[in-house]
Amino acid sequence: MAVPLVAIILAAGDSTRMNSKIPKVLLPVAGQPMIDYALQNAEALKPSKIFTVVGAKSNEVMDHLEKRALPILQTQRLGTGHAVQQVLPRLKSFKGNVLILHADACLIRPQTILALRQFHLLQNSAATLLTARVESPFGYGRILRGKEGEVERIVEETHATPEERHINEINGGVYFFKATVLAQALKDLKPAKGQREFYLTDIIPLVLNQGGKVHALMVPDRTEVLGINNRNQLAQAHRLLNFRRVEEHQRDGVTFLNPKTVEVGAHVVIGRDTVIEGNVQLLGETVIGEDGRIESGCHIQSSKLGRGVVVKASRIVESQLGDHCDVGPFAHVRSGSVLDKKVHVGTNAELKNATIAAGSKVGHFSYVGDAKLGKDVNVGAGCVFANYDGKNKHECQVGDKAFLGSNSTLVAPVKIGAKTVIGAGSVVTKDVPAGVTVVGVPGRIFKNKK
Ligand code: UD1
Ligand code: CA
């Protein structure tokens, strides 16, 4: 029978080292608020309840939690032990296990927490902690072990002797406790020597005094225990999480030419044999088809790209590109644009809310905003869809195979018929039928082909 579980996320720290107006736990890390990683990790274990201890700017944090966790207010920031004490009244009759997570540890993998629980249950421990051997233990609690290798206590940086500071096995800040043992130990907890703060780490000897077993599991990937206390660690976490996502996509058959410079959101999907060059950002709910090429300098956000799409140094936001489209360099495809297959968008072109049918070409330096273009339309260099009259936006429609000469302007709203030719430099202010040629300012029908 499964042992009941509750989770506690500690998120009340002042985070003065971050020097931010935003509560630290809401700062974005690799595309999502810091605390979301802890929430996801807790949720992965399906606990009966998730408590989150909140303090600094608690309203903002509470709003963010919504129904995912029960907020518990820690009015005074008196340390991690004190934070867990605030939850005790809610655990009075609870006899299961308690998982404790820090909201500032984004890199812990859910598998690691599952393994820690397994270990905790198998060893029938009263307390189990996650540790890691790190290169630079500065700032972390060091694990002190006895002669048999058993965990005796945790010593924090400020209290460690010079020898203890050399210990490089550190406390990762993830714990499983038997609830009853935890409750008793927290009642016995005293403030740390010379401090006002109650350290959660100081309860290890108290658990041992109760006759409870304490075990530690060392995580092989030491990057998992990174705690984010300052902007430098925030940048490190951002890089590590992105790199982890890149590795997942590599396993799925995606090539990255310069993986360390790429940002990939948590919800991005990339098809096999697509090549992602350096300095590329793929964010939001972006989907990229197979056999594509995303060249250096692209920013693609919440967009869907079909198969074989090539994008060069361009920005694409909330748009859809059909199979074999090619975009850029330096194009800006703004929200609401929907391109069918084989659409070409040239250098420095800008699209906004443009629906473009298959095979059309939007040449260099043109702006197509609030427009519907048919098939095989040619938008020449420097064409502008003047969609804004100073008050309102208006739409243009262009029929199949229409040809807009360089530097022509469509003053919206206008409709251009199929196969119509607009002479270079014309300013079209009225609807134009199919199959004619329009020239001049304002544009007039030059000759009827029929
Ligand atoms: C803590 C551990 C340290 C461990 C490290 C892992 C203690 C005393 N030290 O140190 O052993 O190696 O994490 O990253 O536990 N918090 C509250 N209320 C408080 C204080 C903190 O909710 O009064 C929350 C913070 O928001 C944070 C977490 O607890 O999410 C850890 O606190 P932090 O101040 O970051 O502890 P560290 O100094 O990093
Ligand atoms: Ca920390």
Image (cartoon, rainbow, N blue to C red):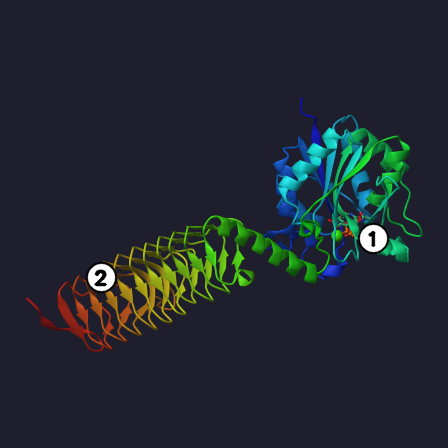
Left or right of 426 on screen, residue 163: right
Q: Is residue 31 visible?
A: no
Q: Is residue 113 visible?
A: yes
Left or right: where 249 falls relative to 327: right
- For residue 381, what is the image quadrant? bottom left
CB of residue at label 1: within 8 Å of ligand 1? no
Q: Residues within 10 Å of mark 2 (few under 14, many from 20)?
A: many
Classed neighbour count for the residue bearing mark 1: other residues with Cα under 10 Å, few (<14), some (14–19), many (≥20): some
The picture places residue 392, in percent across and down from the top left corner, at 37, 63
Quadrant of the snapshot with the N terminus? top right
In the rendered image, which quarter contains the C terminus? bottom left
Instruction: Check mark 2 vs ligand 1: CB closer than 8 Å? yes or no.
Output: no
Residue sitting at 65 percent across and 59 percent down?
A: 236
> Is the residue 27 above or below the residue 115 in the image?
below
Spot the residue most to the front.
148
Which element carries disc 1, helix, strand or loop? loop
> Where residue 101 appears, x then y in whole percent?
72, 43
Q: Residue at x 87, y 56 (%)?
A: 158
Label number found at residue 376: 2
In the rendered image, the residue lying farthest to the left is 450
Percent of width and height locating residue 183: 83, 33
The residue that label 1 is drawn on is 167
Q: Nearer the viewer, mark 1 or mark 2?
A: 1
Residue ID at (65%, 48%): 35
Measured as percent of width and height from the top left, residue 372 is found at: 28, 58
Upstream in sequence: badge 1 or badge 2: 1
Residue type at the position of mark 1: Ile
- Res. 41 image quadrant: top right
The residue positioned 77% from the left and 26% from the top of the image is 95
Asked if 232 appears above or below 366 in the picture, the reply is above
